Image (cartoon, helix red, strand yellow):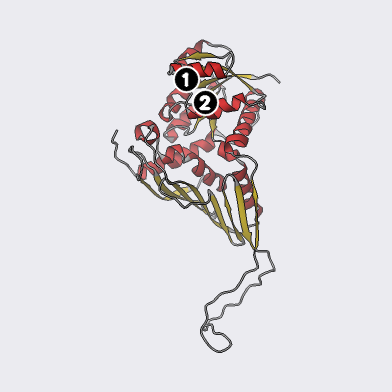
Amino acid sequence: MKKLNVAIIGQGRSGKNIHGAYFLKSDNEYYNVKYVVDADAFRRQVAEERHEGCTTFADYRELYNCKDIDLVVNSTYSEMHYPITKDLLLHGFNVLVEKPFARTRYECDELMKIAKEKNVTLAVFQQTFLAPFYRFAYDTVKSGRLGDVKQISIRYNAFSRRWDWQTLQRKCAGGTYNTGPHPIGMALGFLDFDPNARVVYSKLDTALTSGDSDDYAKILIAAPDKPLMDIEISNIDAYSNYNIKIQGTKGTMKATPKAYEITYIVDGENPERPVIEESLKDANGNPVYCSEKLQKHVEGEDFNGTAFDIGTAELYKQLYFKITEGREMTVTPEMAAMVISVCETVHAANPMPLKF
């Protein structure tokens, strides 16, 4: 199998510790890092040592002189995703861009249009769609095992603070744009990317961040005849013990990227109780509370892998065959664009003052 030559733009946490780390794994049979771009000289030196034989540049535009590049990974600052991806596509490169895809839906649509016109591959790195915990949760909902699912709550919460560039609105940062593509993407996925899905409530706020972006977000998304999606992205929640919680008429499931637990009932084991209009009373005539002990079942198991290993490897595998054979990918630019539509809608409804 012929490996594809890759250029990575950016050697920050994502470019180095996620993408770069994947390319260095022994089971990477699809890609060879040929070029690395970063403005920082030390980071270029480290890249040359890590990726044997690679050439480094300080400016991504120097890649335009290289004719042996099969894929460019755009892992730059968030506000640079759109302009650099656009420039790369116009020069005929296949591009994998980090999340967020862009700042606005218009920018996403423009990038997809250019990719189609240039007949090149455009992909967005939203590997959470391929994470074992999300795929299991999605399959569980679709199986009907939990009955009629009424609400799915997705929490990406912690009790922590940040003071880096990811706290600045002008950098297309903050919780909704930075972390949001994961929970918002999953929420839209549970709704099967229903075009009628709408944000019915949202609130953004700042709590512990040193910047001017949001570190608290509440977003409710609804679609006709679908479960309500309840999303939180919060840096002031010290007690959240799940990432996904599904509430259905036959049971509840909670999951983290590491494990899941389901409490459920089985048809026939808890016969329906007839409605009693009079006040309930015990054998002696004393008033009692309406209660019973349902026959329930509980199960749980650990997941094998996360978005950062299983998800990353699967996305890159699919991308390889998209480029070489034209196969479809699970995560499409259209899906990522719908995520950005939600981010844009939420920010428009909750304008925050620019301070930096």
Q: Which residue is mark 2?
A: 16
Mark 2 surroundings within 10 Å by alpha-carbon count, few (fewer than 14), some (14 through 19), many (20 or more): many
Residue 171 screen position, x and y as percent: 38, 31
Mark 1 surroundings within 10 Å by alpha-carbon count, few (fewer than 14), some (14 through 19), many (20 or more): some
Furthest toward the top, the residue is 65
Which of the 4 quarters of the picture holds residue 272? bottom right
Image quadrant where one finds the N terminus: top right
Asked if marks 1 and 2 touch (Cβ < 8 Å), the reply is: yes
Is residue 16 shown to the viewer in this render? yes
Residue 243 screen position, x and y as percent: 53, 48
Does 108 appear above or below 148?
above
Looking at the rendered structure, which numbered label has been put on residue 98? none
Instruction: Judge left or right: residue 209 versus residue 81.
Output: left
Count of numbered labels shown in the rendering: 2
Q: Which residue is mark 1?
A: 43
Is residue 122 shown to the viewer in this render? no
Residue 195 screen position, x and y as percent: 51, 44
Task: Please state which amino acid type lies under the numbered disc 2.
Answer: Lys
Give the residue at x 56% y 34%: 332
Instruction: Judge left or right: residue 180 versus residue 171.
Output: right
For marks 1 and 2 on the same chain, the one whose residue lies earlier in the sequence: 2
Give the residue at x 39% y 41%: 161
Image quadrant where one finds the C terminus: top left
Which of the 4 quarters of the picture holds residue 318? top right
Does 270 appear above or below 148?
below
Task: Please state which amino acid type lies under the numbered disc 1.
Answer: Arg
